[in-house]
Image: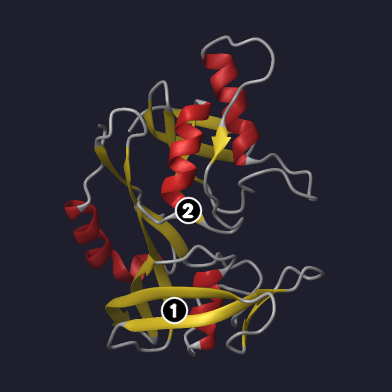
Amino acid sequence: MGEIVRAGRFSIPVLYEDNHLLVVVKPPNMPTQGDSSGDLSLLDALKGYIGEKYRKPGAVYLGLVHRLDRPVGGAMVFARTSKAAARLSEAFRVHAQDRRYLAVVEGAVDAPLELEDDLIKDGRTGMVRVAAPGAPGAKHARLVSRPLACREGLSLMDVELFTGRAHQIRVQHAHAGHPLWGDMRYGNGERGRQIALWAYRLVLEHPTRRERMRFCAPPPVEAPWTRFLPEIDRISEVDAWDEA
């Protein structure tokens, strides 16, 4: 692992950096980009890091090619050139990359969940819900969520996305009867609990070298992840940190 970017109360580990890419671990509760809260965003913090490190005058270019919800942490890639941004954005659009998430959900899950729903977002509240098939404005959403372990009424899931809809993992699991631990918006979370959703794996093709690159970011050692440390350790051994 590379440097640590300090941004207010947040520490942002840098997993990889070259002239075209910047791969980091997004801290939970930090917005990916600026929003109505006015809080410092990951994008702006990283622009400041690039500008200071390389002594770049004026505005720094950093392309946002995908997003994580504010409460979610994990591996993210940013583009440092417009060429890289265009190629990465297209790869994310057609799902040519491999993004995997760990989630802790309520209830015992003993078989993979293959979830397909139509989702619609309320523009006023920002809430997403499952809509009737073919409903105006609804977008198709698909994922597969595989159980890795079940303990004390909770299940650790390995989630593979085939579409990239807003709040998709949270909404589809809740609709299937297994809301995410700590999710106040779509589940039974309590104030002060951190939602148990983490982007642990990112595999992509380098936009200029065309090499396949793999990055792994294990979740923090805190509840509820600590209930599943053996399984998380095994994943980390298979998906070892890729310094490229």
Q: Nearer the viewer, residue 225 or 25?
A: 25
Q: Residue at x 66, y 71 (%)?
A: 191
* Relative height, residue 187 to residue 225 (above, below): below
Residue 17 x, y percent position in the rendering:
39, 27
Quadrant of the image for the N terminus?
top left
Q: Is residue 90 left or right of residue 100?
A: right
**Residue 209 visible in the picture:** yes
Mark 2 surroundings within 10 Å by alpha-carbon count, few (fewer than 14), some (14 through 19), many (20 or more)? some
Q: Is residue 169 left or right of residue 206?
A: right
Q: Name the residue that disc number 2 marks.
A: 93
Give the numbered dot on residue 105. 1
The disc labelled 1 sits on which kind of residue? Answer: Val
Cα gap from disc 2 to disc 1, whole angstroms = 27 Å
Q: Residue at x 52, y 38 (%)?
A: 11
Residue 63 x, y percent position in the rendering:
56, 34
The disc labelled 2 sits on which kind of residue? Answer: Arg
Quadrant of the image for the C terminus?
top left
Instruction: Say which quarter of the image contains residue 41.
Output: top right
Q: Earlier in the sequence, mark 2 or mark 1?
A: 2
- SS of the residue at dot 2? helix
Q: Residue at x 48, y 67 (%)?
A: 196
* Relative height, residue 142 to residue 17 (above, below): below
Q: Is residue 212 left or right of residue 29?
A: left
* Relative height, residue 69 to residue 126 (above, below): above
The reply to whether discs 2 and 1 touch (Cβ–Cβ < 8 Å) is no
Residue 23 x, y percent position in the rendering:
42, 36
Q: Nearer the viewer, residue 27 or 203?
A: 203
**Residue 185 visible in the picture:** no
